[in-house]
Image (spheres, rainbow, N blue to C red):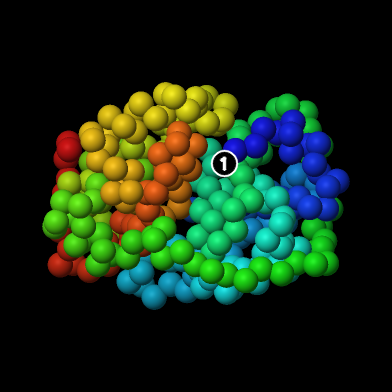
Amino acid sequence: MLIAPERLNRHLSDRGWIVFDCRHDLLDHQKGARVFAEGHIPGAHFAPAETVLSGVKTGRNGRHPLPAPAAFAAFLGKCGVSAQTEIVAYDDVGGQYASRLWWLTRWIGLVRVRVLDGGWPKWVSDGFPTSTEASVARAGGNVTAHPDASRALEVAGVIAGLASGRCLVLDARAPERFRGEAEPVDPIAGRIPSARNRFFKANLNADQTMRPQAELKQEFASLLNGRSSAEVVHQCGSGISACVNLLAMEHAGLSGSKLYPGSWSEWIADPSRPIARGPA
């Protein structure tokens, strides 16, 4: 699931490895392209969160709906990716955008994908090379999407799962957003009723590397309280930072949990859906 900077550095000249820069800012959509131009891992391709890692917005399907599988596969193919390619994704904010690319890649059927542990900050602090050269597409790319519907749950499935008690929603947002005390991005504050909070940054060390597997497994097991990991549905504001919790669970050996891509931004688009606020 993860790769250390020193190992990635050994493979930078390997044509079987392709790196994606996923840096982004929800409040400054031009940031990613700007910082990529200022410096990136040599040979990396820029993967814009608002387009490549997201699909068409309707106003009712959340801020970052899933891209069309064929469109995402075509992007990867243009960058030289094939079924045999080793893919590495990174960002500079604890892996939330890199984890989104990791999840999307696995969703369409590719399995050779990792997130750079510690991301861009650790790559730079460890003294590994950077570049300002534009990325060059590699020949031989060819990806056919085979989306796995079991990895995602639409809003109707979330509602049904909560009503039956068959699913546990884990909200990856900051605690104050979960409690409805603050909402810097979406127009309505609050949370999905009965959801539990697992702030995605709780999975990380101070240097943005992932915490030890045993610690993560123990903490998630406490949240699950006897439930199967397959009953877990991850959400956040728009299906981005929730992917860090998905990655952390997989890293800890707890596989099979799902993503609710629409997340809070889709949930509140329908005023008939219930909202909870205050301590859980």
Q: Amino acid at mark 1?
A: Met
Q: Picture coordinates of residue 104 (x, y %)?
A: 53, 59
What residue is rendered at 81% in x and 36% in y?
A: 10
151 vs 57, nearest the viewer: 151
Q: Picture coordinates of residue 109 (x, y %)?
A: 56, 62
> In the drawing, does residue 57 fall left or right of residue 231?
right
Q: Under tag 1, what secondary structure?
A: loop
Residue 166 vertical position relative to residue 253 in the rendered view, above or below:
below
> In the drawing, does residue 167 fall left or right of residue 209?
left
Figure quadrant of the C terminus = top left
Residue 157 is drawn in which quadrant? Answer: bottom left
What residue is rendered at 42% in x and 44% in y?
A: 255
What residue is rendered at 56% in x and 51% in y?
A: 102
What residue is rendered at 14% in x and 57% in y?
A: 163
Q: Label 1: which residue?
A: 1
Q: Picture coordinates of residue 12 (x, y %)?
A: 81, 44
Give the class, few, some or many, for how many residues have Cα within 10 Å of label 1's Cα (few <14, many ≥20).
Answer: some
Figure quadrant of the N terminus = top right
Examine the rendering and report whether any part of residue 107 can be seen.
yes
133 vs 153, nearest the viewer: 153
Q: Picture coordinates of residue 268 (x, y %)?
A: 25, 62
Examine the rendering and report whether any part of residue 50 can be seen.
no
Residue 2 vertical position relative to residue 164 in the rendered view, above or below:
above
202 vs 112, nearest the viewer: 112
